Image (spheres, grey):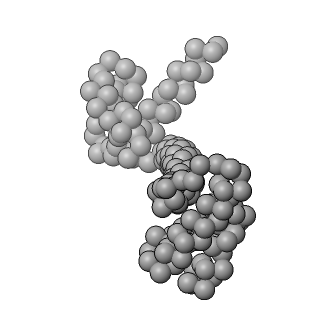
Amino acid sequence: MTCLEAQSNILSFVEEQLPEDKKVEFVKHMRHCSNCKEELEIYYTLIVGMRQLDNNEELSLDFKYRLDEELTRIENKAKKAKRFKVSSFSIVFTFMVVVMFFFYSRCLLKVYNIEQFMKKQAQGETYFYDEFGEYLSVCRDDAVARKIRENTQEKLTFYDKIRIYNTVNSFIIIQEQE
């Protein structure tokens, strides 16, 4: 706000007719411009003093103090409004971050599940080693171990062991169902 705008709003401010959106700028200007503040004090003293005389009230001697209180009240009101806006924004922003984190973690879980499903579908050597590695090579009394011992003259790969395991297990399941 320029000095000219501030000086044109002095009477409206003293008569409490200045719009709320202009009050904050007006007060900021008055706090920083000593010439305009001096003019405001003069007008405030004259107008408020005339009102007191017209209403047969006792003439106050602390016009400057009352003006400073009014300016401080308007500043504090503006600060509270600003704090409310900032805190509201902070709450909404925090909520959005939490929601985004939640959805991001859900997406990561879905990607992980898809990867695991694809891994199981491929049924490669890595999958079976992770799942059965030590058990397939240690089992001695099971049908798979016997079948592998029968084929010891051949060098079997881990994938061949899995194929034999699947064949024998499907054969055992079919026998159990009959």
Vertically, is 77 above or below 155? below
Residue 25: horizontal and vertical position, in percent? 57, 71
Q: Quadrant of residue 10?
A: bottom right
Q: Is 141 left or right of 19, judged from the image as shown?
A: left
How many marks do you count on the picture? 0
Residue at point 32%, 28% (across, down) = 135
Vertically, is 87 above or below 174? below
Vertically, is 174 above or below 62? above
Q: Is 143 left or right of 8, judged from the image as shown?
A: left
Q: Is 154 or 167 nearer to us in this picture?
A: 167
Residue 108: horizontal and vertical position, in percent? 50, 49
Q: Is 17 or 107 nearer to us in this picture?
A: 17
**Which quadrant, please, contains the N terminus?**
bottom right
Residue at point 56%, 84% (across, down) = 2
Q: Quadrant of residue 163?
A: top left
Residue at point 29%, 45% (across, down) = 155
Q: Quadrant of residue 74?
A: bottom right
Q: Is 91 or 22 nearer to us in this picture?
A: 22
Residue at point 71%, 51% (across, down) = 55
Q: Is 1 or 118 nearer to us in this picture?
A: 1
Residue 137: horizontal and vertical position, in percent? 28, 32
- Asked whether residue 159 is in view, the answer is yes
Vertically, is 52 above or below 6? above
- Asked whether residue 149 is in view, the answer is no
